[in-house]
Image: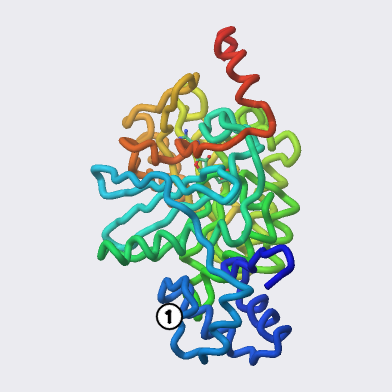
Amino acid sequence: MNSDNVKVNLLDFDRAAMAAWFEARGEKPFRARQVLKWIHQQGVDSFDAMTNLGKALRTALESVAEVRALDVATDRKSSDGSRKWLFRLADGNCIESVYIPEPERATLCISSQIGCALNCSFCSTARQGYNRNLSTAEIIGQLWMVSRLLREDGSVPVSNVVFMGMGEPLLNFDNVIRATRLMQDDFAYALSKRRVTLSTAGVVPGLRQLAEVTDISLALSLHAPDDKLRSELVPLNKKYAIREVLQACTDYVGEGRRRVTIEYVMLDGVNDSDKQAKALARLLRRVPSKVNLIPFNPFPNTRYRRSCAERIDRFRDILHHAGIVTITRRTRGDDIEAACGQLAGDFRDRTRRRERLAVEVNGELI
Ligand code: SAH
């Protein structure tokens, strides 16, 4: 045991890290694969249950390592079958994950950070401020816990993972990538590259780096066809403008990674006009892409409203006519605040954004 009694959390290790760890302990690297399978495929968190390891090894592991996932703070089921968990982390902060079963697949929407630093004006996570990056164990721990809970229930297992919960995944690059390696690993979750999607607000250096290390699917939160409006909605746009972001996405998907999903939240009277649909179509002409229109999900004290269904249909039709595959994302789980942009978690804000916003709301600046 380490002198300070802190055990290694094996959920932090992808296969390479696990193999290196076993090797450093004088064990054969294949132990890594055995242990990965027990942990991620069988949902096991006790070494005693790992019956193909000798008793001596199990005892040795027990004294230095553990499989420490997350505590369930709340577990809510929507009338539409989706389910949202609030997970409590060791430091007391809470994050959210959402399970969305559909006829063809079951998607888990996971968080990559506690809160978010990007402050997009239409997102409720932004209101909560930011605390810190999640560790690899806390990211994969969401999938590990949910898979275990679904198994207990006899529910359909997770077939797809999307990084569309709290946080900006490209600002937590290394931990997110390590977690995606486990998702894709045949000895862990064995999800194909099409079934793991990273959604970003457009962190260009992160996109460039991503192309070098992975082939997972990519979604871009675009939300506006011009820089002026996009900078209002997604302040990160002031740093990385639309053209540069779309170029980075095009380069990423260019190398056999199919198409980037363009996410576009439909805000009444803000970004949903015919003119804006046409401008969006022009912008995407040379980007291998498909568009996901997301009806805005309201939250308290927001100045935005959802575009009406007719407007969304008309916007979609304009994109269709321009030859762009466009679907409208069905709102799921809104009765349990589990819909896109409604994830709020429960954590200490280090940015004091919440306090500043409270002042603005009371002063009716919002
Ligand atoms: N930071 C990443 C991932 C988290 S957001 C990103 O920006 O892509 C996941 C998706 O939900 C994004 O497309 C985001 O723009 C969208 N979203 C945020 N708030 C929303 C709201 N109130 N209604 C609908 N979609 C929202």
Q: Quadrant of residue 282?
A: top right
Q: Is mark 1 within 8 Å of ligand 1?
A: no
Quarter placement of the C terminus = top right
- Residue 28 vertical placement versus 4 (above, below): below
Q: What percent of the width, then of the height, locates residue 325? A: 43, 52
Q: Is residue 363 left or right of residue 323?
A: right
Q: Residue at x 52, y 69 (%)?
A: 183
Instruction: Pick the residue in front: 17 or 99.
Output: 17
Circle 1 residues within 10 Å: few <14, some 14–19, many ≥20: few
Give the colour scheme of this rendering: rainbow
Instruction: Pick the residue in front: 317 or 159.
Output: 159
* Observer able to see residue 52: yes
Q: Is residue 314 left or right of residue 129?
A: left
Q: What percent of the width, then of the height, locates residue 48? A: 46, 80
Q: Is residue 221 left or right of residue 109?
A: right
Q: Quadrant of residue 73?
A: top left
Q: What percent of the width, then of the height, locates residue 180? A: 57, 65
Q: Please name the residue that numbered disc 1 is placed on.
A: 49
Q: Identify residue type, mark 1.
A: Ala
Q: Residue at x 43, y 60 (%)?
A: 145
Badge 1 marks a residue whose secondary structure is: helix
- Residue 235 vertical placement versus 333 (above, below): above
* Observer able to see residue 200: no
Q: Residue at x 57, y 41 (%)?
A: 222
Q: What percent of the width, then of the height, locates residue 303? A: 50, 19
